[in-house]
Amino acid sequence: MLYTLCIVLILIASVLLVLAVLVQSPKSGMAANFGASNQVMGVRQTTDFLEKFTWGMAVAILVLSLLATTAMDSHLVEQSNASAADANALVEKIATPAEQQIPQVEIPAEQPVEQPAETPAE
C-alpha cells in the first residue's frame, strides 16, 4: 500500500516539476533580453518561489524514490529477481557456443624479400 502511494506521489511530483520548469523564464540568452520588463512589481518573488519549488520537487522525488524502494513488497522483489534470472538465462542461450563459432584464419607472416646481390660497377 505504501509502495503504491509513493509511486503515485512520485508521478504527481514529476508532473509538477515539469510544469515548474516550463513556467520559469530563462536566466540568460536572447529570450532573457525580451523578459527584462518582467522585473517589476513582485515578479522577482515569483521567480524565487518557482526556483525553491523546483528544488523542493526534485528532493521530494528523490526521497519518495528511496522510500518506495524500502517499502517494496518482498513478492515484487522476488518477481523482479526471477525476471532478471530469466533474462540472463535467455542471453546465455542466445549466445553462440564456442563450438559453433566460425574458425579464424591465421594470416601468414610476410616472407622477407631477398635483395639481389650487388654487382660491381664496370
Image (spheres, rainbow, N blue to C red):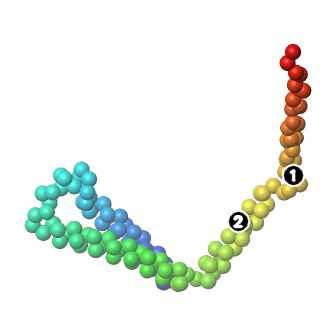
* Pick the front one: 26 or 107: 107
Residue 115 falls left or right of residue 58? right
Residue extending farthest to the front is: 122
Q: Residue furthest top?
A: 122
Q: Residue at x 90, y 26 (%)?
A: 117
Q: Is residue 86 left or right of residue 71?
A: right
Residue 92 higher or lower than 11, as above or below: above
Q: Nearer the viewer, residue 56 or 33?
A: 33
Provide residue 39's location: percent of width, then percent of height.
13, 63
Q: Position of residue 34 (x, y in %)?
A: 18, 52
Quadrant in which residue 17 is drawn: bottom left
User: Where, by quadrant of the figure, is residue 10 drawn?
Assistant: bottom left
Q: Secondary structure at mark 2?
A: helix
Tell me the mark number nearer the camera, choosing from 1 and 2.
1
For this view, does 18 lie left or right of residue 87?
left
Label 2 sits on residue? 87
Q: Amino acid at mark 2?
A: Ala
Residue indicated by mark 1: 100
Q: Where is residue 40 drawn, in percent x and y?
A: 10, 64
> Relative to 5, does residue 112 appear above or below in the rendering?
above
Q: Looking at the figure, which quarter contains the C terminus?
A: top right
Assess disc 1: are there few (<14), some (14-19) or many (≥20) residues with their C-alpha within 10 Å of its C-alpha: few
Which residue is painted at 64% across and 74% down in the image? 80
Which mark is first along the chain, 2 or 1?
2
